[in-house]
Amino acid sequence: MRTGYTTGATAAAAAKVATLALLGGGRRSEIAISLPTGEDARFPLAEWAWTGEEARCGILKDGGDDPDVTHGALVRATVRRIPTPGLWVRGGEGVGKVTRPGLPVPVGSPAINPTPMRMIRNAANAALSEMGFGEPGGLEVTLSIPEGRRLAARTLNARLGILGGLSILGTTGIVIPYSVDAYKLSIRLALEMAQGVGLEVVVLSTGRSSEKLAQVLLPPLPVQAFVVAGDHLGYALREAGRLGFRRAILAGFPGKLGKLALGYQDTHERRGRLDLEALAALLPGNAKETWREGFAAAPSARSALSLLPGEARRALGQEIARRMVIQGMTLAGCGMEIGGLVLSHDGQVVGLSPSWLEEIIGR
């Protein structure tokens, strides 16, 4: 299947070519940028305009064969000089605004995630260097997606408190499309590789970020032991059992693993949002009544957990770990031992079960 580029990479490319245009770099039919992976990517321009006071350039988002709502959307950068020194990146038409805490972007800011923001700034600075400028003086880059407000209605942005448009996302700059069958095949091949090198323990994570954190916490295990199962934890557990692994550790953040603890077999957000009120019911004693209302109104599991004091957060994480181990044993359908490792986004252990997992981590 054909790979594509994220909205973050597309926005960065638009920002670079618009900055070049403003500084006298002339009209171009395409632009190249460096991605966080170290690769270079080229983007054809869909629009180019320069008035002398500002430059406006647009690129059509190409998501490859990934069925994302942003595929084909115009991502535009408008660059102009301003009196305030520095390079300023702003959100314009069709770029959502963050209205609730708990996301990696502050409330009131445009919904441009940290990695895309770095890409956009790096691309604009690369244009400055190319044109022989040092300090930019004052330069404003405004990103817009003209169809963003309409397209956002087909996403979960409003539930997350992102209003008025789309988010600009992406961690690598590249979109790798996966059909369900292809994803499952990749899981099976990774497990067979682990089996082939004689491993008895595998770590099934819900995503790349949780995998990286688990690797730091589980240094005794080699890299082949770590498999990104995504939303297919049930399939991964059954395959691990079939291949004869002695133990499987499930690692992830409270949102995904909270779904598993509550009995969801498919953890993808498109199949249903995590019932945060039901998650609050797992809190001990009076805490469940104290925090139930706040949980139900939170935009995400991450922001819901941020409401809790440390002791209550650990108690909930521990209950999620305990319950997901039970669910995992049911999904595996065999005698394989299951471990549960619930992580916070800063790499702390929120919940852990059973006790043999503590020995591996060294706690």
Image (cartoon, rainbow, N blue to C red):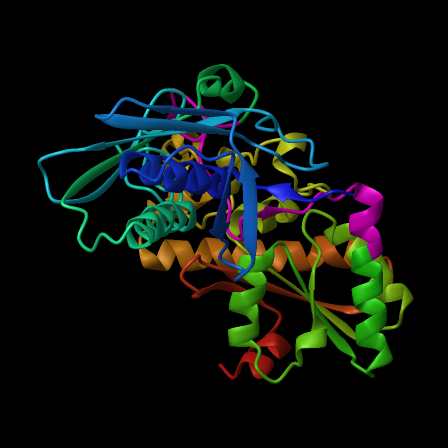
Residue drawn at the location 63% of the way across and 49% of the way down: 261
Q: In the rendered structure, which segment of residues is drawn in magenta?
A: 156-185
Could you say which quadrant of the image residue 334 lies in? bottom right
Q: Position of residue 74 (x, y in %)?
A: 50, 24
User: Which residue is at the front of the view, 163 or 134?
Assistant: 134
| Residue 39 seen anywhere in this rendered image of the structure | yes
Between residues 103 and 37, which one lies in front from this camera angle? 37
Q: Is residue 71 magenta?
A: no
Residue shown at 30% from the left, 49% from the top: 131
Residue at screen point 50% across, 51% down: 171
Find the residue positioned furthest to the left: 83
- Coordinates of residue 266 in the picture (x, y in percent): 71, 41
Above or below, 218 relative to 103: below
Membership of 157 in magenta stretch: yes
Q: Main secondary structure of the magenta part?
A: loop
For the N terminus, the quadrant is top right
Determine whether, in the image, residue 272 is placed left or right of residue 349. Answer: right
Query: Is residue 138 toward the left or the right of residue 180 in the image?
Result: left
Q: Is residue 154 left or right of residue 283?
A: right
Relative horizontal placement of residue 187, taking residue 291 as reference (left or right): right
Image: 268 above or below 353: above
In this view of the protein, can residue 286 be seen by the observer?
no
